[in-house]
Amino acid sequence: MNKHRSLLYLAILATTSGAFAQSKTTSSVAKLPEANIARTSVEAHIRFLASDELRGRRTGEPGNMVAARYIAEQFRLLGLKPAPNQTDFYQNVPLQVVKPASSGSLTLGGTPLEFRKQFLVIAGPPVDLNTETAYIGYGLTDGADGYNGRDVKGKIVVAQVGSSDGGTGSGMLTASQQKRRLAAEKGAVALIELYTSGTMPWAYVTQMLNSEQLSLAAGGTQTSSLPTIWVDNAKNQLGSLKEAGQKVSLQTSGRPLTPVNSVNVAGIIEGTDPKLKNEYVMLSAHFDHVGVAKPGSPGYSESDSIFNGTRDNAMGVAGLLAAAKAFSEQPPKRSIIIVALTGEEVGLLGSRYYAEHPLVPLNQTIFNLNIDNAGYNDTSIVSVIGLDRTGAKADIEAGAKAFGLSVVGDPAPEQGLFDRSDNVNFAIKGVPAPTFSAGFRTFNEELMKYYHRVADNPDSIDFNYLLKFCQAYTHAARLIADRPTRPKWAAGDKYEPAAKVLYGL
C-alpha cells in the first residue's frame, strides 16, 4: 500500500513539475517586449501601408517611396542605427525600366521564326549578327551540363531555359541572368535559350515577358547586356540547335532602358554579447506590391482598382516593425539587421541587389528569417517555407508556440515557394534563409481570392491573428539570435555548398 502511495506521489509530482516548468516558461516569455506588442500598433502599420493613398506601393512609383519613408521614420523613432558606412536608413537600388523590343528577326539554318510568336527578345541592345552557334546545355557552369571546355568567342551560345532543377518563372529569369553574365565573360556575342518547360505555357511566357519590366540597372549587379532570346521549343522542333556550328542570323531593335531609383530600408540593433554581437540575424520582408490595375486589365473595376497588398506584404512589414520595437527595448545577444526590401514583385530585385552589396558582411550574417505572404486560411498556425532545411526548426516552433500557434513546414510543395521569395537570393549565397508566412496548408479559394486581388485591403484582415503572427515571428527571431550555435543547412541541401564557401566550413 505504501509502495502504491509512493508511486502515486511521484506521478503527481512529475505532472505538477511539468506544469510548473511550462508556467515558468510562459512567465519568462510574458516579461519580454514581444509579449506586450499592442494590437493597435501593428494594425496602424497595416492601415497606413495598405491604404489607398499609397496606390499599391509599386516599385518605382511614389507610393513605394512613401512606404519606404514610413519604415525609415519608424526605425528612427525606435532608435535603430543605420548600417555601417550608411548616413541614413536607405540603400539605393538602381533600377531600369525595360521596354519591349519593337522589332526582331531570327533565322535558324535558313528558316525564319516569327517575332513575338515563336521568339522573344529578353534583354540586350540592338544587334545585327550572322554567326555560328555553340550548344552549352544549361549554360550555368563550366562542367558537363555547361560549357565543358567549348570555345564560344564570337559565337551565339544556345542553352536550355532554367536549370537542371527545373523551377518557377522567377527562377528561370534568375538563371537566365546568370547565363548571360557567364556567356559574356566567355566572349559570346548573344544567348539563345530554348523554352521547353511545362510549368507555364509559351503563350503565358510571351504575355509576361513581352511587356514593360523593371530590372537591376547595369552597375547594380554584374548582369550583362548581352542580347538574349527565348525561343519556343515545346515540341523539340529546334533540336538541330544542339548540334555544333549551326548558322544563325539575328537582328533586333533591342530593349530600350530608362533609369529608375528605389531603395531598401535597413536598420541595426546591436547585440549584447561581446563576441556574438559581431554576428547578425537578418530579418527581412518586401514592402512593395503590384500597384493599380489599368482599365481593361485583370482586377480592374470602376469601384476599386488598387491592389492594396495587405497580406502581401504589409503584413510582413508589420512583423518587421514589431520586431524592431521589441528588440530596441531588449536586444538579443547577436546583432539584428532589419531590411525592408523593394522590388520583390518585379523579380526579387531588392534582395538580389542586397545580396550582391550587403550592408553587413554576409559571412557575418548567420541567418535570414524572411516574411512573405500570399494570404492565410488557417489562423491556428504559421507556415514556414524551408523549416526542415535551414537549421532553426526548434527555435521557430518554440517562438510560435509561445503565442498559441503551431508551425506547418513547407505546405504546397508543388508551388516551389522556397525559390520564389526574397530568401532565395540569400540562400544562393549560403545564408540559411526560410520564409515565415501566415498560416496556410494549401493554395485554395480562400487564399486565392485575396492573392494579388483588390480585395486584399486592411478591412479584410484578422487583426487578432496578425498580432499573434508578429509576436511569434519576433520571439522566434530572438531565440535564433540568442542560441549558442549558428543554424546550419540540412546535410545535402542544394545550398549547403555555398554555405561552406561563405562561412569557410
Image: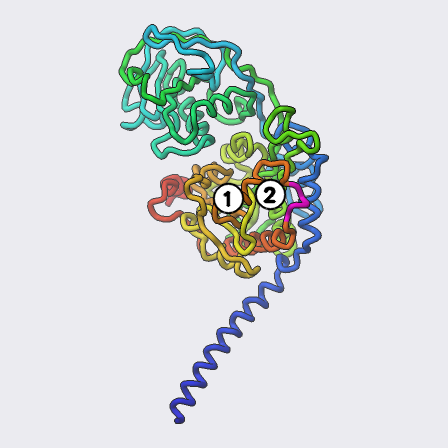
In the picture, which quadrant includes the N terminus? bottom left
Q: Which mark is residue 218?
A: none
Mark 2 or mark 1, whichever is nearer to me: 1
Q: Earlier in the sequence, mark 2 or mark 1?
A: 2
Up-down relation of residue 341 to residue 391 (above or below) = above
Q: Which residue was labeled with disc 1?
A: 444
Taking depth in this image into account, of 191 and 324 the one nearest to the observer is: 191
User: Disc 2 versus disc 1: distance between alpha carbons?
Assistant: 15 Å
Disc 2 crowd, CA 10 A, few/some/many (<14, 14-19, 20+): many
In the visual, does 287 lie left or right of 18? Answer: right
Mark 1: which secondary structure? loop
Q: Report the residue at 44% width, 47% height from top.
A: 410
For badge 1, the amino acid type reads Asn
Q: Which residue was labeled with disc 2?
A: 311
Image: magenta residue range: 457-461
Up-down relation of residue 173 to residue 122 (above or below) = below
Q: Report the residue at 34% width, 26% height from top.
A: 138
